[in-house]
Amino acid sequence: MNLLLLDANIIISLHKMGLWTEVTRRNSVFVPKLIISREAYYYPDKSGDHFINLPEQVGKNIQEVSATPEEILQLKNKFNPAYLELHDPETEALVVLSKIPDSQLCTSDEAAVKAAVLLNLINKMTSLETLLRISQLPFNNVEKKDSEQRFRIYIQKAQIMQIQGNGLKV
C-alpha cells in the first residue's frame, strides 16, 4: 500500500474521474489540514456542481495531517517570491512530506513541483497519471494538467531555475 499525500487539484480530479473511492481504498491517503478546511469543496461537470466532504472522511478513508503556521512560514521564506510563490496549502503539504517517511506528494501544481525540485524532494513527488498507474487504475482519461508529461515539464523548468540560481533566497 502506498502512502500518498494529496493536493486539492488531485482530489478534485479523482472525484471528476470517479476514482476517488478506489484510490483511497488501495492507498493510505493523507490530506493537509488546510486543504481539508479551505479547498476541494466541490467540482463542476456537465451535470452541475458536486460537493466533496473531506472533513467527513477524516479517520475513515483519509488521514488529516498538518504543519504549524511557523513551519509553513519558515518554508515559504526559503523561496524568492520573484521566481516562486507557494500557496499555504501546498506549502503545508511540502512541510508534511518530510515528516511522513516513504510518502509521495501527488500534485499538478507547478509551484509545488518546482519547490520540491529546489528542495531536493522531487523523489517524493508524483503525477496523477503515475499514481493511477501504480494503483493499477485506468489513467487514459487523465487531463493534460495531471499528466506525467506536464509533470516532467515542471521538473525541467525547476532544474533550469536551479542551474541559474533562481528560486531560493540566497
Image (spheres, grey):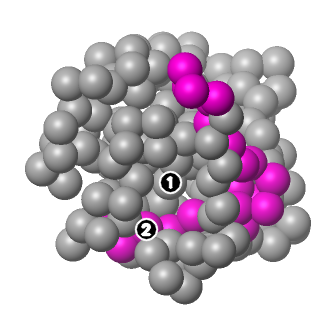
Q: Relative to 106, does residue 153 appear above or below in the rendering?
A: above
* Residues in magenta, as a range: 27-48
Camera-side residue of 43 and 166: 43
| Image quadrant occupied by the N terminus | bottom left
Camera-side residue of 69 and 3: 3
Tag 2's secondary structure?
A: strand
The residue positioned farthest toward the bottom in the image shown: 59
Residue at the spot of label 1 = 6
Camera-side residue of 157 and 88: 88
**What percent of the width, then of the height, locates residue 139?**
22, 32
In terms of image quadrants, where is residue 44? top right
Q: Which mark is residue 106?
A: none
Query: Mark 2 to mark 1: distance in Å?
Result: 7 Å
Left or right of 7? Residue 4 is left
Q: Which mark is residue 29?
A: 2
Q: Relative to 61, does residue 111 appear above or below in the rendering?
A: above
Residue found 79% across the figure and 62% down from its top:
37
The amino acid at mark 2 is Val
Residue neighbourhood size for the residue with mark 2, other residues' Cα within 10 Å, grouped as few (<14), some (14–19), many (≥20)? many
Left or right of 165? Residue 75 is right
